[in-house]
Amino acid sequence: MKNKELGLRKEKILEAIIRSYVEETTPVSSSFLVERYSFKWSSATIRNTMAQLEGEGLLRQPHTSAGRIPTDKGYRYYVDNIIKPKKPSSQKEISIRRQYDSRKKIEKLEDLIEKTAHVICAITNQAAMVMVPKITLNVFKKINLLQLDKNRMLIVLLDTSGMVKNIIINLPENVKFSELKKVENFLNEELKGFLLSSIKDYLLTKIKRHQDAVFNVINNACEIINLIDITHMNNKLFFDGLSLIMDKPEFRNFNKSCGILHVLEEKTEVLEIMNEDLEDFKNDIKVHIGSENTYEDIQHCSLIISRYQVDNHLKGNLGVIGPTRMAYDEVIPVLKCISHVLSDILSKGNFIETT
């Protein structure tokens, strides 16, 4: 029983220190906890517990006479074992949906993703990041080949998730405009229900099997599909609220601020993290805290990432990046709710992806 009570006391005090540090941005002392919270323990007991938490690596003392602040390990324990994020109320979801409403209908996928980054930033007060969804699991529905001028054609590809991909290409030399309708009809009849990622291999196999009149049509279709590169993922990432990062006390240090701005400007490292999470996502939320991040320039940051998807054919990640001193219990449920709303919007509309 004593051990159980000791564990509960440690958790309550760790939670109080983290909440206080998130709000106050200054080291937390035992006297502050006594004044702020109605604990049943004495000031001496709280001091001893804080020392134990420090000994376990969950707290640290930045200065000899200062209070304590959480370590990355402390935040990790808090996220995994203490907080129990509540599901946002129906009013919160309605409020989030209203932020997507505008007089001008959103038709382009990138506009929707950019809007989502703005919504995340406005609600969480953290820098937001949203990746354009992967399309490799999408299923072919229809394709149109349209002549623009003497040498160029417009290709409009629709998949079953409602995604529309537009691309303008130069017509291959061996393909004539007079043959495009045959190619279009062949693709629409032959590929319906195919995963986009499997189309190229299928057409190449079919070419080998046919050496008759259909060969030219298949060969031309293959040429066009190669130029479209329909399974290509642009790996686009939208940010919003970068100025909020500079407003945080943690990033007033020049070296820290330059490092994180470089990472966000290049986007490569953050995209790599988000893509890895997309492929290895056992839960609907992943939290990367401080030194857990591989890249040195963001080892004083936390990334909270949530996944959105439509019918397992369309999926992407969204999230926030900011200091480890973050209100995880508030941000996590908000991101889950925004992911749900975005998934719902994507499932109900046709959005154009431009290349």
Image (tube, rainbow, N blue to C red):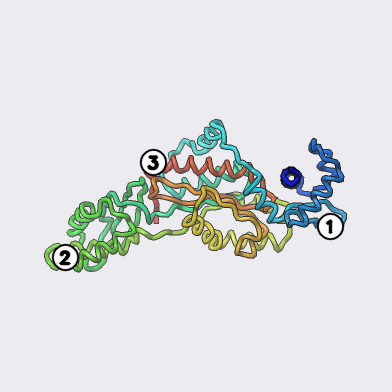
Q: Quadrant of the N terminus?
A: top right
Pointer 3 residue: 349
Q: Residues within 10 Å of mark 2 (few under 14, many from 20)?
A: some
CB-based contact (under 8 Å), mark 1 and mark 3 = no
- Farthest residue, direction front: 1
The CA span between labels 2 and 3 is 37 Å
| Residue at horizontal 53 percent and vertical 40 percent from the top | 337
Q: Secondary structure at mark 3?
A: loop
Q: Secondary structure at mark 2?
A: helix
Q: Residues within 10 Å of mark 3 (few under 14, many from 20)?
A: few
Residue 134 found in image quarter: bottom left
Q: Position of residue 102 (x, y in %)?
A: 48, 37
Residue 179 in view in this figure: yes
Pointer 2 residue: 215
Pointer 1 residue: 63
Above or below 212: residue 347: above
At label 1, the amino acid type is His
Q: Position of residue 353 (x, y in %)?
A: 39, 51
Q: Position of residue 30 (x, y in %)?
A: 83, 46
Mark 1 or mark 3: whose residue is earlier in sequence = 1
